[in-house]
Amino acid sequence: MIERPWWQHAVTYEVYVRSFADASGDGVGDLEGVRQRLDYLEWLGVDAIWLTPFYRSPMADFGYDIVDHTDVDPLFGTLGDMDRLLADAHAHGIRVIVDYVPNHTSDRHPWFVESRSSRTNPKRDWYYWRDPRPGSSAASDGRPNNWLSLFGGPAWELDPATGQYYLHTFLKEQPDLNWRNPEVVRAMHEVARFWLGRGVDGFRIDVAAAVAKDPELRDNPLDPDPKPGQFGAEWLRQVHAHDFEHPDIVAMWQGFRRVLDEAEPPARVSIAEVASDDLVRWARYYGPQLDAVHMPFGFHLVRADWHAAWLRAAITRVEAAVPDGAWPNWVLGNHDQPRIATWAGPERARVAMLLLLTLRGTPTVYYGDELGMENVPIPPDRAQDPWELNEPGQGRDPARTPMRWTAGPNAGFAPATAEPWLPVGDARAGGDVEAQRRDPGSMLSFTRALLRLRRSDAALLDGAWSPLDAGDGVLAFTRAVPGRRVAVVLNLGADAASVALPSGGRVLLSTLGDGVRAGERVTRAARGGGPAAPLAAWEGLIVELDEP
Ligand code: NOJ
């Protein structure tokens, strides 16, 4: 095994805190609930957890609207709970990454309350305040530019008391901080220092791409050829040239990296949410000397066109874009996306997990995906996500439903007397941790076996990635270190298939379950032809090749 920083060999597991485990019995998950499930996470075999925001918040965007960055919201517990969780996670050999939300605060944050109090307040410039456009009447279209909120509607809100507009890339309850003001940078670095001092192992950086905007706040050009995407039609009609990713962004993250590198002990990690499709822009976040964020999230396969040729080409492009010496990152699902088993299809949930955990780089597993959880339909009167309420159909609630621990009341997420904040969905045969733990053929048993194998396999941890030519419908690649090579073959289709391998070998793991097919030999066909691995419909295999 190559000696590497811990996070390069780690598998991260995203805990959407509201939905993981409710210890207090109020229907919302909490930090103590997470602590009580550390045995499970250790048993599963993940190395780090990422906790979504648990800071004090009015919860307009479920915690991504912070009023106090250095305290825990009572809904999730106390600072003492967080200290206990950190200590216990470390005792379980699990690192803890917390969410860092730099782009905006809550409109009730004391900084914003001060900032909006008058045009001359010392914190006025901590946020983006602008006069109405000359010639407009305050009541009409006086917005300073054409920028839009990702959650629908314009990105500017008029504050009648001071007669100026403020900018909000998300909800109007989430005003954007002005990172061009050094006082803001200092204050936000202090937030990071606070959590580093408490012992967190790193940060997941929320909308890292938004903190540098065009200094002149110019209008975004219109897109002559808008492509379909995750956001509302109006938002997609613009080229987001000025509201996101001004080139100064790299220097901002270099500054943040220095804060991390000064921490004692060092070795903290930063993983930045960057959704850029442009791989050159995406790769800039590593920094020219690999001195900005440790990794931008690799979202490139999320909601992908699930065809072998497309995936092969996309992975090849990302591998080529990652700078020399930098480390890739892969994600297939999170709290902003539909469940993998829903967009890729439930029958592909296992090959998706196999792909995620065998690509070169640090993967993030979204809670519940190890069970193959699917989107849970949310009746309109139970909708919670503000995006859903603004733009029906865009909502993220279906992928944020409570973790399914047991077949009992509330799926074991919360005491039977509680009403979970989102419905737990229909009980499916075998669709909970308790049942899947007992079944060696379950998705959970497969995921656990895969995590175990990955931890001990130098080729899977460190090996170079090379695609194999596997024809239509099958994605195949090798991972190789000197002296060891494994092949990963994924049948993405409903027909049985067979994949030619560069040499004979031995099956280490099949998506069909822990121990199923393990040890089976893949040999040269009796009459001519090379060694070929047979695959059932939707099956994936890891094969240890005889010839490294
Ligand atoms: C990205 C987060 O993942 C999402 O959940 C949130 O709504 C926005 N950023 C705003 O903070």
Image: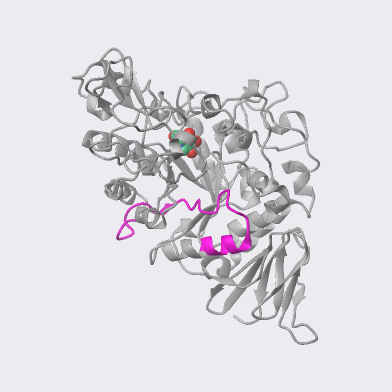
> Which residue is at the front of the view, 530 or 458?
530
Span of residues in magenta? 286-315
Name the side, left or right, on which 378 lies relative to 62: right
Q: Is residue 136 visible?
A: yes
Q: Quadrant of residue 423?
A: top right
Residue 68 image point, x, y percent: 39, 26
Query: Relative to 338, is 409 above or below?
Result: above
Q: Quadrant of residue 514?
A: bottom right
Query: Relative to 535, is 335 above or below?
Result: above
Q: Residue at x 75, y 28 (%)?
A: 409
Predominant SS along the magenta part: loop
Residue 31 image point, x, y percent: 54, 33
Q: Residue at x 64, y 55 (%)?
A: 352
Residue 261 image point, x, y percent: 32, 51
Q: Residue at x 57, y 28 (%)?
A: 392
Indicate yes or no whether the magenta region holds residue 301.
Answer: yes
Residue 77 image point, x, y percent: 52, 27
Name the side, left or right, on which 368 lies relative to 153: right
